[in-house]
Image (cartoon, rainbow, N blue to C red):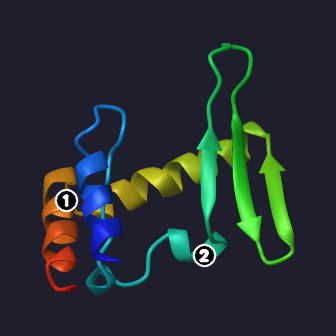
């Protein structure tokens, strides 16, 4: 576990990787309602993207603009609730040091 956490902290130094931690102390959040999701964007202006939502029996690929927007808003809310990237990496490193 320690090595995995330190690896995550190290990867956060990459310019295309952002690590943000949402502490349990923040309580309920939008990520809890629908479960894990990803928003996939594409370089073509005519393609608004896809919201990929996992559930117990499989996954949904949501393509309607209002569905993508709902997940984009939920993601933005999660980012706002989470620790900053610097605070998150510090927390990850601090937790890693608890492991031997």
Q: Residue at x 82, y 57 (%)?
A: 60
Quadrant of the rendering where the C terminus is positioned: bottom left
Q: How many residues crowd mark 2 within 10 Å: few (<14), some (14–19), many (20+)?
A: few
The residue that label 2 is drawn on is 33
Is residue 32 positioned above or below 62 on the image? below
Quadrant of the rendering where the N terminus is positioned: bottom left
**Residue 7 % position (x, y):** 30, 57
Q: Are the residues tagged 2 and 1 within 8 Å (C-beta)?
A: no
Q: Quadrant of residue 88?
A: bottom left
Q: Residue at x 69, y 32 (%)?
A: 49
User: How far apart are the alpha carbons under marks 2 and 1?
Assistant: 26 Å
First-in-chain label (2 vs 1): 2
The residue that label 1 is drawn on is 89
**Residue 64 % position (x, y):** 79, 40
* Element under disc 1: helix
Q: Please name which of the two marks, 2 or 1, marks the residue nearer to the observer.
A: 1
Q: How many residues crowd mark 1 within 10 Å: few (<14), some (14–19), many (20+)?
A: many
* Element under disc 2: helix
């Amino acid at each position: 576990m320690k090595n995995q956490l330190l690896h995550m902290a190290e990867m956060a130094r990459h310019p295309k990787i952002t690590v943000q931690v949402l502490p349990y102390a923040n309580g309920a959040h939008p990520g809890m309602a629908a479960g894990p999701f990803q928003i996939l964007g594409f370089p073509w202006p005519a393609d608004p993207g896809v919201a990929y939502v996992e559930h117990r029996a499989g996954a949904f690929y949501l393509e309607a603009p209002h569905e993508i927007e709902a997940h984009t808003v939920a993601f933005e809310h999660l980012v706002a609730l989470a620790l900053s990237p610097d605070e998150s990496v510090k927390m990850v490193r601090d937790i890693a040091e608890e492991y031997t």
